[in-house]
């Protein structure tokens, strides 16, 4: 286990190093000088040079890369040019929208997919199963931002139950949750469709095993067998998928935040890109990538804990 | 033939046909604005209604299909032409440093949130169809590399490969003449799925303004334009979305149908 853990940790660190280098390079080759963008076209050359020095733009690229990465390790994400505030602080504020949104969506997806997958597997080939499979085909084909627009049309305009956009803040948690409900439903739908499909097929695989026949033979009912032996054994692949889905929720969240005008990380990235606020773009994207890689790592770890055979590979 | 193969094939053919037809004929000129006739509901003059500039939505959908299909198709092409040789190479030199390098790199790209990076790439290098193709295509490479490697690995242990080896064929020739034809089915099925994912990704990118730029119509931007008009004229938001859903649904059904028709044992990656 220790050797496995060490190997996985090394690959985690390596991934993060490569990821940070790629992000830095992509952003660095971007056309446009942030300093001249901030000062406008009439800026004096001396003012421009002074600002470039203040922002550290006159340093060689490798020095700026090192300063950026070592800074992030100590929690210093740099200072935004446009907001005139520490990037960590700006991200911290936005995180309170994006993270609850992703978790809300994940919860909804699981709540929807579990019963659906269970029912489908238990009624394989019959009407309920076909219904679930049709729903899942449709779920993966619907672009979630379009589904979001339909939700707005139905539940915010025709039937005014939820707000069509914006975020009131967490002072009133109920109001905040209400504002996040439609975005979370929109995000959850495709994920629920995928999850239901995976749960169904992994349950069907599990139900074909010999131990299921044994359980039935010793007198357990169908339902008892399904719960005690089927669901438990089908859970491992499902957990992996849930881990992987976090990455989709983060990416999907960026676009969904645009639909609902939610001031989360997604909108922050778009605003920062259009204002050429490079440090904000770099650090926010790096944070998202870090979150995804970390979740994948933790999923692998959980998997290895649950299934000793995997530790050997 | 299975029902999903027929239905998927028909839907896919319908969209490919409409896109091809749009080069020669559309019901209306997609650049012609007609402000008095804007936001008309579907009717006899305009089968699917008109948008906020009075443009015919059916014509725009047909021309927009071109953009979606071109972007997704070229992105699949990038994945196939770069990913498959990489995967075959890794399998041919299995266990070696080259295999290790290729496998680790594709694992790494897999771990990246693809849409976040696609947004970053298109935002930094400027929005447009070409950059959207590159951003989507890059993430198709590891999919095909991993798939080709996995399938090729199991083939390398088979007797007919051993026979080819004994006959003196080089690693390159065995990969090209014996391995590749045997994994072609798998690649075709995976291509359909990546194609449908590409359509969705392109729609997402052009929805946030990072795909094909005006005046080239694209489904994603039609939805973005419709967003503020949803309450006034729901059809301008509903119809382009339905086009995306049916196209993606058709490709997914086609992929499932092809998989069952070609080889029911095929395992396809769904990411």
Image: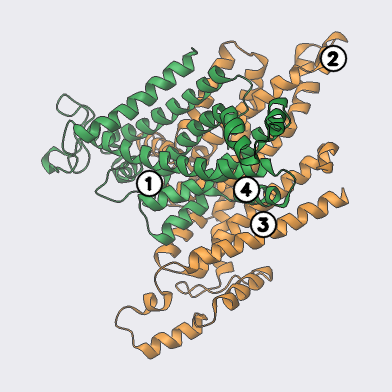
Return the residue nearer the eye: A230 or A84. A230
Q: Which chain carries label 3?
A: A
Q: How far apart are marks 1 and 3 (CA)?
A: 30 Å
Of callouts 1 and 4, the N-terminal one:
4
Tag shown at residue A215: 2
Of callouts 3 and 2, the N-terminal one:
3
Query: To which residue does mark 3 refer?
Result: A15
Return the residue nearer the eye: A267 or A4. A4
Residue depicted at x 77% and y 56%? A9
Query: Is residue B167 among the parts visible in the rendering?
Result: yes
Residue depicted at x 55% and y 69%? A87
Tag shown at residue B207: 1
Task: Classify mark 1: residues with Cα within 10 Å, few (<14), some (14-19) or many (20+).
Answer: many
Hue of chain B? green
What SS does tag 2 mark? helix
Residue depicted at x 58% and y 60%? A286
**Residue A71 place in picture, x, y as percent:** 64, 73
Q: How far apart are marks 3 and 2 (CA)?
A: 44 Å
**Closer to the camera: disc 3 or disc 2?**
3
Q: Are marks 3 and 2 in contact (CB under 8 Å)?
A: no
Q: Distance between the residues labelled 2 and 4?
A: 42 Å
Q: Are marks 2 and 4 in contact (CB under 8 Å)?
A: no
* Quadrant placement of the C terminus of chain B: top right
In the rendered view, would you say B158 is above or below B82? above
Asked if badge 1 and badge 3 are on a common chain, one would say no
């Amino acid at each position: 286990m220790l050797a496995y853990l060490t190997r996985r940790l090394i690959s985690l660190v390596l991934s993060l190093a490569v990821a940070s280098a790629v992000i830095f390079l992509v952003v660095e080759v971007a056309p446009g000088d942030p300093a001249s963008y901030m000062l406008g076209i009439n800026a004096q050359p001396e003012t421009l040079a002074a600002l470039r020095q203040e922002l550290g733009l006159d340093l060689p690229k490798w020095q700026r890369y090192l300063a950026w990465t070592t800074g992030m390790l100590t929690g210093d994400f740099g200072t935004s040019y446009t907001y005139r505030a520490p990037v960590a602080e700006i991200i911290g504020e936005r995180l309170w929208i994006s993270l609850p949104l992703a978790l809300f969506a994940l919860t909804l997806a699981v709540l929807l997919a579990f019963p659906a997958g269970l029912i489908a597997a238990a009624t394989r080939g019959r009407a309920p199963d076909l219904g679930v499979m049709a729903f899942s085909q449709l779920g993966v084909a619907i672009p979630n931002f379009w589904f979001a627009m339909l939700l707005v049309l139905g539940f915010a305009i025709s039937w005014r139950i939820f707000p069509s956009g914006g975020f009131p803040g967490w002072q009133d948690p109920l109001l905040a949750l209400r504002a996040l409900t439609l975005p979370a439903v929109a995000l959850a739908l495709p994920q629920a469709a995928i999850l239901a499909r995976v749960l169904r097929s992994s349950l069907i695989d599990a139900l074909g095993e010999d131990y299921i026949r044994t359980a039935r033979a010793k007198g357990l009912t169908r339902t008892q067998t399904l719960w005690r032996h089927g669901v438990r054994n089908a859970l491992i692949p499902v957990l992996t998928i849930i881990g992987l889905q976090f990455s989709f929720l983060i990416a999907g969240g960026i676009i969904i935040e645009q639909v609902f005008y939610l001031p989360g990380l997604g909108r922050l990235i778009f605003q920062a890109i259009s204002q050429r606020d490079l440090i904000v773009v770099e650090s926010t994207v790096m944070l998202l990538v870090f979150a995804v890689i970390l979740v994948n790592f933790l999923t692998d770890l959980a998997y290895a804990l649950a299934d000793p055979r995997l530790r050997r590979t | 033939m299975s029902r999903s193969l027929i239905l998927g094939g028909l839907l896919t053919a319908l969209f490919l046909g409409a896109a091809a037809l749009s080069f020669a004929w559309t019901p209306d000129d997609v650049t012609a604005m007609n402000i008095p006739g804007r936001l008309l509901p579907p009717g006899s003059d305009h089968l699917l209604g008109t948008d906020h500039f009075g443009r015919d939505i059916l014509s725009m959908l047909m021309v927009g299909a071109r953009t979606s299909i071109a972007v997704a198709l070229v992105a699949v092409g990038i994945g196939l032409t770069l990913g498959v040789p990489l995967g075959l190479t890794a399998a041919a030199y299995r266990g070696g440093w080259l295999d290790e390098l290729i496998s680790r790199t594709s694992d790494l790209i897999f771990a990246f949130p693809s849409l976040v990076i696609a947004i970053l790439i298109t935002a930094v290098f400027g929005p447009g169809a070409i950059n959207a193709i590159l951003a989507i295509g890059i993430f198709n490479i590891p999919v095909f590399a991993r798939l080709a490697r996995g399938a090729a690995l199991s083939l390398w242990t088979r007797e007919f490969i051993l026979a080819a080896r004994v006959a003196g064929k080089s690693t390159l020739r065995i990969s090209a003449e014996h391995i590749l034809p045997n994994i072609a089915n798998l690649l075709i099925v995976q291509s359909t799925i990546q194609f449908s994912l590409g359509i969705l990704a392109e729609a997402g990118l052009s929805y946030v303004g990072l795909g094909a730029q005006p005046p080239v119509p694209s489904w994603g931007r039609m939805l973005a334009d419709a967003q503020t008009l949803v309450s006034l004229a729901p059809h301008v938001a509903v119809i382009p979305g339905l086009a995306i859903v049916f196209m993606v649904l058709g490709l997914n059904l086609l992929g499932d149908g092809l998989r069952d028709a070609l080889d029911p044992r095929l395992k396809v990656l769904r990411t």
